[in-house]
Amino acid sequence: MPLLDLAGQVQQLRTLARDFEALHARVRDLSYTPGTDALHKISPLLLKAQDLTATVLMHLGTLESSAYSSVAGSRSSLECLASVAVASTLAGNGLASALLANPYDGAPFPGYPADDAATHTARHTTAVPEMTEHLADAAHQLDLSATGCHYVATGITQDRDAAREETVSAQAAAVPALTRTQYDALKALALGGGHLYESAQRGPGATRVATGDGTRISMATFRALNKRGLVGRDMSTRLSRGQKITVTRLGHQALARPRPAATTAQPARAAAPPTMQGARR
């Protein structure tokens, strides 16, 4: 699944929520006269609602097909976004229904008389309550859509932060525990660097560690750090010239922990007195 900029998605969803809020305010405060005036004022609102619905569906498809869908809790956000698509669609339906209830002044079929002034006024007066009801329902659905977008944006942020904390915890758990000596050696290599050399004094095959600040590190300590993946060395260089030692990412994570406390030697137990055999009765 493709990676996704979740922070960017959150920002876009917040913007989408504000667009729904702005459209909600326009529908709620709409002033119109039934007939041509209503058609000219409601039609752009319907087109905007449809455009916002298309944007919701785009975000739903993007999130569902991305790696975010594997994050714990993402299902709730996806379902909520799908409900936003329903609400915005219902808002568009309310606006369209208002246009359906709007009285139009077109000519009737042949043989039917044209509306007189009284009939015209009655048709317009009768249409207003029905149009008002449809517009109020559309405004309510737009308000729900805005709330849903804010909810999804918050949910994505919380899911992302929870996933990060889980990753950090898992990484911390993977860092091996160190002795005080190993910690000091690792810190010296991280700060001053070091090289692994072939020791001429000890003969062929014998190696030693040289650090930049002069800290003495035994080969046993180095091997323990290397075996645990806390340090690495440049194998492309000969030991006679010195192989550079580097502290790995896992090693830096180990150094982020507190320095191990000094262990206190446990006093030796007193030896039990020998069993007397052949004792006199």
Image: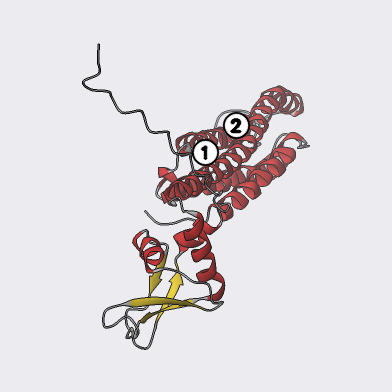
The kind of residue tagged 2 is: Gly
Coloured how? Answer: secondary structure
Q: Nearer the viewer, residue 238 or 44?
A: 238
Marks 1,2: beta carbons within 8 A: no
Residue type, label 1: Leu
| Outermost residue, front side | 280
Mark identifier at residue 94: 2
Position of 125 compared to 66: left or right? Answer: right
Q: Position of residue 281 (x, y in %)?
A: 25, 11
Position of residue 85 measured from the top left corner of the image (x, y, whole percent): 52, 38
Is 231 rendered above or below residue 86?
below
Of label 1 and label 2, which has the lower sequence position? 1
Nearer the observer, 224 or 219: 219
| Mark 1, residue position | 81
Q: Distance between the Cα atoms at labels 1 and 2?
A: 20 Å
Q: Vertical placement of 185 versus 243: above or below?
A: above
Place residue 143 in its image quadrant.
Answer: top right
Circle 2 Cα neighbour tier, 10 Å, few/some/many (<14 / 14–19 / ≥20): many
Judged from this view, the residue extending furthest toward the top is 281
Give me the residue at 64% from left, 47% from top. 14
